[in-house]
């Protein structure tokens, strides 16, 4: 018997759910077993099971054997960084080259890791993420930045774009939105999804 998986909205994180105990923030009630769910992090899933299918590469890099897009994840939640890394692990055209827990040292780390794309949380303790984004775009103009945040209102989007983000992706969206945004950034596109 196969288990049907679906995304759950979880505060500051992404998870997949199946029937079982409630996922944090996913709702459900012990009195109503049909609403109970069990959280399964993407790390626990084989690559093809997460989301039902892999997101397909949109360029020739996977087919031609050229280098994968190098992605640096910056988020104060180690779980988010681990989850993003796991999601990319099953994608031939994407490689997570590292993660940072704050925006401090972002330019140096992006240069050291030769990042093509940086996924940057906008609300972290410590260094100012918007200021770090401005410095990164100035120092490494070929490196594309995707703002990744739970705040996705119009003002935040405008501020992120003004700081140099090519796109803002909402943490409240579908888990695979970030992979699509990374590919759009790599291909020079600017998306409006969030």
Image (cartoon, rainbow, N blue to C red):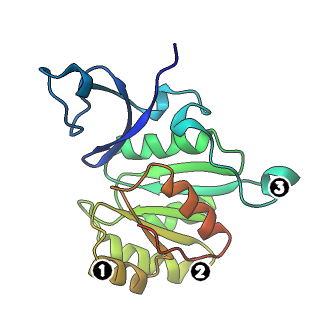
Towards the viewer: 8 or 106: 8
Above or below — where is 2 with respect to 118?
A: above
Above or below — where is 172 with respect to 190?
A: above
- The structure residue drawn at horizontal position 50% and vertical position 65%, both measured from the top left corner, is 108
Between the residue at mark 1 and the residue at mark 3, the CA separation in whole angstroms equals: 37 Å
Which residue is label 2 attached to? 141
- Label 3 sits on a secondary structure element that is loop
First-in-chain label (1 vs 2) = 2
- Look at discs 1 and 3 and give the one toward the viewer: 1
Which residue is outermost to the right? 64
- The structure residue drawn at horizontal position 48% and vertical position 68%, both measured from the top left corner, is 146
Residue 179 placement (x, y as % from top left): 55, 55
Which residue is outermost to the bottom? 162
First-in-chain label (3 vs 2) = 3
Q: Are marks 1 and 3 in contact (CB under 8 Å)?
A: no
Residue 60 placement (x, y as % from top left): 82, 59
Which residue is label 1 attached to? 154
- Total labels: the figure holds 3
- Label 2 sits on a secondary structure element that is loop
Q: Are marks 3 and 2 in contact (CB under 8 Å)?
A: no
Between the residue at mark 1 and the residue at mark 2, the CA separation in whole angstroms equals: 25 Å
Residue 107 placement (x, y as % from top left): 49, 69
Towards the viewer: 131 or 20: 20
Which residue is label 3 attached to? 66
- Label 1 sits on a secondary structure element that is helix
Residue 15 placement (x, y as % from top left): 37, 38
- Look at discs 1 and 2 and give the one toward the viewer: 1
- Report crowding for label 3: few under 14, some 14 to 19, many 20 or more residues within 10 A (C-alpha): few
Between the residue at mark 3 and the residue at mark 2, the CA separation in whole angstroms equals: 22 Å
Above or below — where is 44 with respect to 14?
A: above
- Look at discs 3 and 2 and give the one toward the viewer: 3
Which residue is outermost to the top? 1
């Amino acid at each position: 018997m196969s288990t049907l998986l679906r995304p759950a909205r979880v505060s500051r994180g992404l998870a997949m759910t199946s029937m079982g105990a409630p996922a944090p923030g996913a709702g459900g009630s012990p009195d109503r077993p049909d609403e109970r769910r069990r959280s399964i992090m993407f790390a626990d899933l084989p690559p093809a099971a997460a989301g039902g299918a892999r997101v397909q590469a949109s360029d020739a890099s996977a087919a031609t054997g050229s280098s994968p897009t190098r992605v640096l994840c910056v988020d104060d939640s180690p779980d988010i960084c681990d989850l993003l890394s796991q999601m990319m692990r099953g994608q031939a055209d994407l490689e997570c080259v590292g993660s940072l827990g704050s925006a401090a040292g972002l330019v140096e780390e992006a240069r050291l890791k030769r990042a093509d794309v940086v996924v940057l949380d906008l609300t972290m303790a410590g260094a100012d993420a918007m200021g770090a984004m401005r410095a990164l775009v100035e120092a490494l103009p070929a490196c594309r930045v995707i703002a990744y945040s739970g705040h996705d209102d119009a003002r935040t989007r405008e501020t992120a774009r003004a700081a140099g983000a090519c796109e803002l992706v909402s943490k409240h969206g579908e888990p695979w939105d970030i992979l699509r945004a990374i590919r759009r950034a790599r291909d020079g596109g600017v998306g409006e999804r969030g």
